[in-house]
Image (cartoon, grey):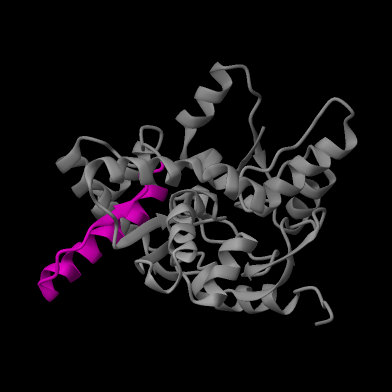
Amino acid sequence: MFQVRVSYDQKPYRRALMETYGARCVASPSNETNAGRSFLAQDPNHRGSLGIAISEAVEVAATHDDTKYALGSVLNHVLMHQTIIGQEALLQLEMAGDDPDVVIGCTGGGSNFAGIAFPFLGLQLRGGANAKKRRIVAVEPSACPSLTRGRYAYDFGDTAHLTPLTKMHTLGSAFTPPGFHAGGLRYHGMAPLVSHLKELGLIEATAYHQNACFEAGVMFARAEGIVPAPEANHAIRATIDEALRCKREGRSETLLFNLCGHGHFDMAAYSNYMAGKLVDQPYDEAELAMALSGLPSVPA
């Protein structure tokens, strides 16, 4: 298994769990693939990215007859598979006699966000002009803001350009995000369906730095007894801010967010936050401009 180098270093217990079940974990970029070796040649200390790890995994699958590759995010069929989350939430809220005014999900490649949001958005679209209008909010890291800063264009889903072109909000497949702790959100692009909905104005997007998100995660843990994953903290931060908005405006709204994972394997990040060592890492504007300048030229 290829694990992004920065996560390989930051999350040793996640690696240990996979190894306990028999997996062999390799830090990406690695010396085990042509793609990995090419990135290490450029930078021997490369921190890696999801795009590079995908390149390595696709290369291994393509060169070994006994190996298959299944993408876990970004592609539209994965998003639709994940909508079981929102379908269950619809039924649960119906049982509770409630209906959300705002639906919130953290967003990296898009599958988690689509999972919670698409069923509610579909209900709204099928209802026509008289349907309840909900705000659907995608929350991403400020250090990797594909929806709020990316360009809507055709791009590769991986960094070595082994995958087909996809029209999406992208920071450029060559973009390497800073090494913040929400590793699952360190992806250069956004799923085509999520990107299209953003272009249609049916969803909105916001971005947060990691310290604000960990502050929200600690608050949630002390109130609810569940330690959230760094990725989920983004949705919690946005939900808290929406609740504070309602308080300021004197409004009563139902807020729904997806708690997409626990943080039991991310306690090193929480320790750094508690010790004041967690740094809000801005992306490199020059690197972003370089990555966007290298987008494929596709006729309109």
Q: Residue at x 63, y 22 (%)?
A: 23
Residue 51 placed where, x, y %? 67, 54
Above or below residue 253? Residue 292 is below
Q: Nearer the viewer, residue 84 or 7?
A: 84
Highlighted range, magenta: 231-260
Q: Nearer the viewer, residue 70 or 284?
A: 70
Q: Is residue 114 above or below residue 165?
A: above
Residue 215, quarter of picture: bottom left
Q: Say which residue appears at 16% left-offset and 41% top-offset.
A: 222
Q: Is residue 292 above or below residue 194?
A: below
For the point 37% across and 71% down, the residue is: 130
> Is residue 42 a member of the stretch shown in magenta?
no
The x and y percentages for residue 91 are 36, 41
Location of residue 107 in the rendering, given as x and y in whole percent from the top left corner: 48, 57
Q: Is residue 199 left or right of residue 240?
A: right
Do we see residue 208 in this rendering? no
Among all residues in the image, which is located at the extreme bottom? 300
Q: Which residue is nearer to you in this view: 245 or 158?
A: 245
Q: Nearer the viewer, residue 85 or 222?
A: 85
Residue 241 lies in the magenta-colored region:
yes
Name the quadrant of the N terminus.
top right
Characterize the magenta stretch by its predominant secondary structure: helix
